[in-house]
Amino acid sequence: MQLLDGKATAAAIKDELTIRVKALATKGVTPGLATVLVGDDPASKVYVASKHRDCAAVGIHSVQKQLPADATFPQIAEVIDELNADDAIHGYIVQLPLPAGISQQAVLERIDPDKDADGLHPVSLGRLVLGEQGALPCTPRGIVELLRRYDVPLNGAEVVVIGRGITVGRPLGLLLTRRSENATVVLCHTGTRDLAEHTRRADIIVVAAGKAGLLTPDMVRPGAAVLDVGVTREVQADGKARILGDVAPEVAAVAGHLAPMPGGVGPMTRAMLLTNVVERAEQLA
Ligand SMILES: Nc1nc2c(c(=O)[nH]1)N[C@@H](CN(C=O)c1ccc(C(=O)N[C@@H](CCC(=O)O)C(=O)O)cc1)CN2
C-alpha cells in the first residue's frame, strides 16, 4: 500500500509557494489572507490558528477577525464588508461551521466572490460548474492535487464520493468530472440504498461522511485508492480525546493507496487555501 502523504506533499507545496511569494515581493506585492472566526468552537480555533501559522511560514500577510458566539448577522456583515474593501487582503475565509442561528448561506453570499479564498461563494461554485476560472474549494482541490502528485490516474477512473456537503462532496464531484480530470463520479449519501455495491466497483473512494469507521475492508476493491476526509472527535473513558476517521484502520490492508486521517487530506486543505491566495495576488500583480 502506498501512503498518500498529505503532510509531506503540503510541505512541498508550501516550499513552492514561498518562492512564488518572494517573486511577488520583487513587484512590491505581499499576498494577504484574512480569517473570520465567529464563536469559540475548539476545533475551528485550532484550524484558524494553523492557517495563520501557514501564512507566516510562506510569507503571506494575515489578519484574524474574531467575533463572539452571539454575534449578529449585521455584526458579521460589517466585518465582511471591511475585508471586501481592504486592498491588503487578496482573499479571506469565514471559518465554518457558524454558530446556530446564523445563516451560512447569507454569510457566504456577503463575501466579494473575487476575494473568496475558500471557493464556497455561490459565484465561485457557479464558475466551477461552468468551468470558468475562479477559486476552487480547498479540500476538493487538495484531493485532486494529492492524487496528481502521486500519479493516481483520474482519466476514466470510477470515483465514489461519500458525502454531499458543500465543503467537500458536492464540489469534489464537479471538480473530478471536469474535462481536465475526466473521472466518472458516483456521489453517495445517506439516501444511497446499497453503499457497498458502489464502493466495491470504485477505483478511488473519497469518504467525507463524518461517520467514524464507515468504510470497512469488505467495501473496498483490492488495490483501490482510499482517501479519508472524516473527522470525528471522541472522548474516551479516561477523559482523553481522540480523533477518528471515516475509514476503518483495517482498510490499509486492502487499499492500493491510502490518504489517512490525520496526515492526508487535512494538510492539503490548508496548502490549497494558501495557493488560492497566492494565485489571486499573482493575477492582480
Ligand atoms: N471556511 C472553511 N471552513 C471549514 C473548512 C474549509 O475548508 N473552509 N474545512 C473544515 C476545517 N478545516 C479547514 O478549515 C480543516 C480541517 C482539518 C484539517 C487538518 O489538517 N486535519 C488534520 C487532523 C484533524 C485534526 O487534528 O483536527 C489532518 O487531517 O491531518 C485542516 C483544515 C471545516 N470548516
Image (tube, helix red, strand yellow):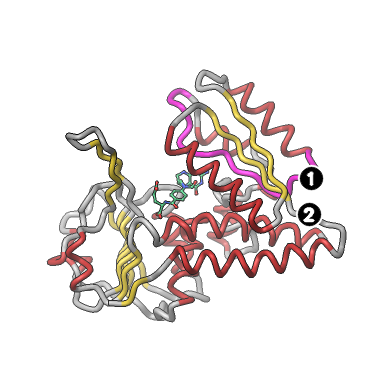
Residue type, numbered disc 1: Ala
* Residue at x 60% of width, y 64% of height: 14
Q: Which residue is mark 2?
A: 30
Left or right: 249 as drawn, with respect to 91: left
Q: Earlier in the sequence, mark 2 or mark 1?
A: 2
Q: Quadrant of residue 88?
A: top right
Dot 1 beta carbon under 8 Å from ligand 1:
no
Residue 126, position as x, y percentages in the image: 57, 54
* Residue at x 76% of width, y 62% of height: 283
Q: In this rendering, is residue 200 above or below 212? A: below
Q: Quadrant of the N terminus?
A: bottom left
* Residue at x 17% of width, y 54% of height: 193
Is residue 92 located in the magenta-colored stretch of the structure?
yes
Residue 176, position as x, y percentages in the image: 44, 68
Tag shown at residue 242: none
Query: How many labels sit on residues?
Result: 2
Q: In this rendering, is residue 98 above or below 270? A: above
> Looking at this view, is 40 or 123 the one in front?
40
Residue at the extreme front of the image, as rendered: 238
Left or right: 250 as drawn, with respect to 92: left
- Region in magenta: 86-101
Q: Main secondary structure of the magenta part?
A: loop
> Looking at this view, is 266 or 15 the one in front?
15
Labelled pair 2, 1 in contact (Cβ < 8 Å): yes
Is residue 70 located in the magenta-colored stretch of the structure?
no
Q: Quadrant of the C terminus?
A: bottom right
Q: Quadrant of residue 49?
A: top right
Query: Could you give the CA–CA distance between mark 2 and mark 1, rounded to whole angstroms?
Result: 8 Å
Q: Which residue is mark 1?
A: 88
Q: Nearer the viewer, mark 2 or mark 1?
A: 2
Q: How many other residues sit within 10 Å of disc 2, few (<14), some (14-19) or many (≥20)?
A: many
Q: How many other residues sit within 10 Å of disc 1, few (<14), some (14-19) or many (≥20)?
A: some
